[in-house]
Image (tube, helix red, strand yellow):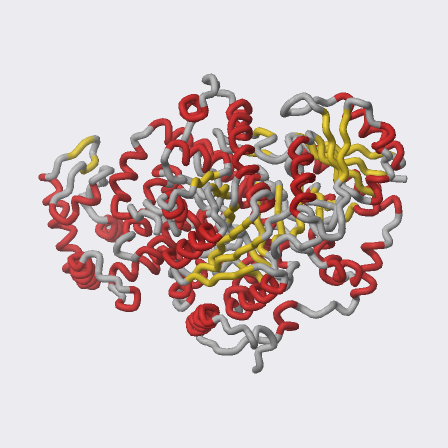
Amino acid sequence: MSEIKTEFYKQNAAKAIKDPVLQHALFDVQNRLGPATALAYKNLPEGMALRQKAHEIRQFAINHLDILLETLVQKIRDRGGKVYFAKDAADATAYCLKIAKENQVKMVVKGKSMVTEEIGLNKILESNQIEVNETDLGEYIIQLAGETPSHIIAPAIHKTRKEVAQLFTQKLGIPYCEDPPVLTQAARKALRKKFLAADMGLSGCNLACAETGHITTVSNEGNIRMSTTMPKVHMAFMGMERVVARLEDHDALFRLLSRGAAAQNMAGYVSYIGGPRTEDQLDGPDQFHLVILDNGRSRILADPKFREILLCIRCAACLNVCPAYGKIGGHAYGYPYSGPIGAVITPLFVGINRAKDLCCGEPLCGACKNACPVDIDLPRMLLALRAKLADGDPKWGVTRANSMEKIAFQIWSLVIQNRKVYDLALKTGSLIQNLLPKKNGMITTMPFVFKGWTQSRDIKPLARVSFLTQWKNRENKP
Amino acid sequence: MTRPINQEIKDTRQHEFIMTIQKALGKSSSPDLAELFGTAPENLDNRLNAYINKGKPDRMDLLDLFIEQAKLLNLTVRPVESVSQAGYAIQEFIQQTKPEWGTQKSVIAWHHPLIEQLNLKETLDHDVTLFTTRSSPTPDSKERQEIRTHLIESYIGITSADFCVAQSATLVLRTRPHQPRAVSLVPSIHVAVITLDQIIENLTELYFRLKWDPEEQKLGLTNCMTFISGPSKTGDIELVMVHGAHGPRQMIVYVITG
């Protein structure tokens, strides 16, 4: 399992907001990728409607997940690939370790994969004396720095070129230089040795195709092709939901994935991998293993309210437009998945109570839904999670986040249903507020249960005469 | 409904996994495969015909589209009239470029009918070593190791492709005997040689032909089909675009139009 730090959301968010370097980086990534992706959707020959089509394709796949996985697996096995169904993180990592030991693996190279972050694979391998090399440049940077990814597709976005230059000088022994091409070349040189010496390559899977029996991997750097071509053993990890039925489904999905992730027409490299090297071929791995992971996904699948989140293709478009992510960055979410997708899926994976601040921290503005290449209604699910926190839900093991809140709202509901009581409450309020500290005509501190409202902002006082009274007075005038 | 596949697999782990999914979906049977994967469209022959038998003007338009899209990706496209012209251009290109690692100029090329016609063996300068990936029917580990060594030594890799998708400037390469996938990956420069009729319009056409053209069905997608859209790139340091992250730093496609 990946380390779960969702409980520290508020502290980490506050820290992030005070970090000027991070604020600059977040502004930059959102400012550049957010509008570029929106424009790229608009320029599609099919326009925005392609997103709905992609939604239907993904929905169809999820509704037929059982037979699609069986078809995929059968075809991969027919080509000599090995498939392992893992019910949880421990199961998946144990299988990986077993295969690594069987093949006397000393060093692995890894393509970028969120699902291996989710299962905490690196730690397990390293604690068994296997050297793990992240090979995506961003992942490589944060691995050298001993950090975790802060963005799904640009994991080192929180690092400036100065920081990378210092890191490379220290860890790779190169002369200090802040030039991105020089830094990239240094990583290219260091990792080329690793690609050629590694005993095993690890990758994720972007979208498998059941009909043909292939997984696909997508990258711009070519590191995933290297990891899946040069070592003798290739093991791919896929969340069980990452499959579509038909080959032509990839038409809409790859075009949208490339646009959602990086505003590209098409990602630099897409590989369809369906098995190990055949005996007449000159290269490719001798063994191909596919690990299909549940790890809480079947539980999400069983709940019609949340099933839609399994349509996600992990492009990170929602991160690039989310006002909350844009201020607090990826680390505050305390789990590999950040931004709106993280705010929905992390509570479902690690426990809704445990990660309650994630879904409460999002502003429900709908920007994520508009940016999603498969048109997932993230705000709807954020609200559904909050409803569970308000009412509790034994099925998900959710206890009421705050029992006082429920009582307060019940009282509030009684108050607003009775005109006289409501007017009285307003009048009392407008009297009491005279005692509260103010600045520039705004209340800066509220007492008791209301203090949360003024924790990070000031609040406007109640009007001395309510709107309704003003209206009546106006009408009564001759 | 009966299950047409996987009846004899006795993988209890898989069985449990799939049962969990079926329980979550609230169903116990699935539709037949034709419904899942689609049946051949009625106008199949017409559509295939229209794709395959395009006239030269249409193909030249696609070439223009390819060139335009390739520019955005820093992918160089060089139309040439004949194979011999392509051979000459490649020879000249090799003369003008230097290896990224070391000083020895080595080039590795696919064993492929179109590449053989380039006649590189005869035309290359003496200081250039040319390796080809011709292999025995079932290459043993020694033979494979030898090719791997050549591949790592080479700074230019020459391949052909199955298709070239104009709309996204994407080359589609399937893995075959004598045509290792690493030739388009490990050397610093990837040179590809294709003919004009290999350029198709978009992904829709590509997937349609792969799925329904009987010729394509015979080969299938193979165990590794790769899409390549331009040289390797990264934006992982402050979103600054840099070419040559791990794959080729430069990519050139020669299109034989004659």
Please state which of residues B204 and A45 is positioned toward the viewer in this rendering: B204
Q: Is residue A400 left or right of residue A238?
A: left
Seen in the picture, residue B112 relative to B219 is either above or below; the reply is above
State the image quarter where residue A17 is shown. Answer: top left
Q: Please state the total of marks drawn on the protein image.
A: 0
Is there any visible trace of residue A404 in the rendered image? yes
Where is residue B24 shown, x and y percent of the image?
Answer: 42, 71
In the picture, which quadrant includes the N terminus of chain B? bottom right
Please state which of residues A465 and A232 is positioned toward the viewer in this rendering: A232
Q: Residue furthest bottom?
A: B1
Is there any visible trace of residue B67 in the rendered image? no
In the picture, which quadrant includes the C terminus of chain B? top right
Q: Is residue B43 left or right of residue A38?
A: right
Where is residue A106 shown, x and y percent of the image?
Answer: 46, 42
Seen in the picture, residue A206 relative to B27 is either above or below; the reply is above
Please state which of residues A169 and A61 is positioned toward the viewer in this rendering: A169
Where is residue A336 shown, x and y percent of the image?
Answer: 39, 46
Where is residue B247 shown, x and y percent of the image?
Answer: 61, 35
Identify the residue at image location x=40%, y=58%: A380
Identify the residue at image location x=35%, y=44%: A127
State the image quarter where residue A26 is shown. Answer: top left
Identify the residue at image location x=32%, y=49%: A358
Please state which of residues A244 and B224 is positioned toward the viewer in this rendering: B224
State the image quarter where residue A42 is shown. Answer: top right
